[in-house]
Amino acid sequence: MLARGRTVIGWGKEATNGDRLILAAKTAVAAAIAWYLAPFVPFADSEYSYYAPLGVLVSMYPTVVGSARAGLQALVGLALGIVLGLGGLTLVAAGAPGIVAVAMVIAVGIALGGIEALGDGRDWVAIAGLFVLLIGGPAGDEFTLSYLLTMAFGVVVGIGMNLIVVPPLYLRRASEQLTMLRERVRGTLDELADALEEDPVDPRRITDATSDLPTMLSTVEEEVQQADESSRANPRGRRRLADKELNERRMRALERTANATRDLAAALVQVADEDIVPDAAIRGALARAVRTCADIVGAATDDPHAEEKLAGASDALNALLEELGRRRDTDSRYTTAYAYAAAVCVRRIVLASEDFVVA
């Protein structure tokens, strides 16, 4: 019951966050404007003005580019559906039973909806075809023209509203998500270093430390992509070009770091499962290298000691390689191979951090 209550609270927060409320207000105003002005659309019958707010709805997305793309795709799908519906009306006029025409329109519309290039317009093919077939009737030409024009007018109003009134810009939110990811990767590396200092190494602890990294990485990547999209065709985005580029570089660096961290964890779990864990000296050197990587990964973008931390990570990696060189002849080949594999993962993290510090 408690979990269900938390879910409901979470839904409430999602529905009432600032960005969502702004989008809701803009959509409501745009729909009202479209409804009021639709009777003045040339060549469209005012009887079908209610399709203008629908055009607003299909085009109002969180970003300006998203609105334009969704609106255009909806109109393309709508146009295909209208052609399909007119084909159904032709069948009826030729004497085919109405039920056959309905089945044909829906079947072909669903099939055409499989065209991925239609995007958000995929669902509109069958819907528009059915509307034209059932509502158009004898006045099919008049209805289809009004339907298409009023929907297109609503799409234009929606895009215009999104562009003019508080065009959304998600660069700051993406930056905050990147910082959360950075701290999560840093915490994971610290956890791996702690696990290496244990005897024996606990593979369950390592697995748990990295279990949520793929999901978090995917979520943050989507945020950065949406932030990038929100800055395109956005007047405010031109003034934040540096922030956009910084987010992209941070994302690349953190993606490489997170993937290397997961590979490092996988190698450690493998050696623990096979009971071929290197001796304490090698594990200690590896733990120190991993911990220094955690320090540089956790450095803020304006950390004045970032280069110093990066140098420390490189030194710790060199110390690990020297230790491996000394033990190469006395340890088993598999132990040495896994130790070098772990060192390669550490090297990847250092390189990713180097790119980021230079940025």
Image: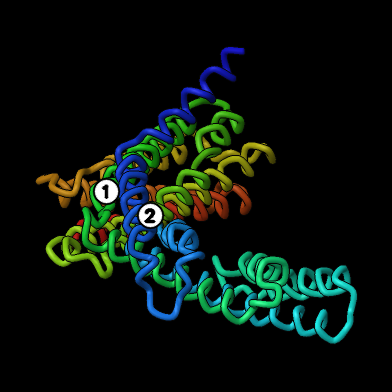
Which residue carries the number 1 mark?
A: 175
Which residue carries the number 2 mark?
A: 31
Image position of 342 with respect to 105: above or below: above
Residue 52 is situated, as x and y percent measured from the top left of the image, at: 44, 63
Residue 257 is situated, as x and y percent measured from the top left of the image, at: 39, 53
Image position of 171 with respect to 288: above or below: below
- The quarter of the rendered structure image containing the C terminus is bottom left
Image position of 301 with respect to 190: above or below: below
Q: Amino acid at mark 1?
A: Ser
**Disc 2 versus disc 1: distance between alpha carbons?**
33 Å
Identify the element where label 2 is drawn.
helix
Work out whether residue 290 or residue 282 is closer to the camera in this orientation and state it.
Answer: 290
Image position of 241 with respect to 175: above or below: below
The answer to whether residue 281 shows anywhere in this view is yes
Work out whether residue 245 or residue 166 is closer to the camera in this orientation and state it.
Answer: 166
Which badge, 2 or 1, is on the more N-terminal residue? 2
Q: Residue at x 41, y 30 (%)?
A: 13
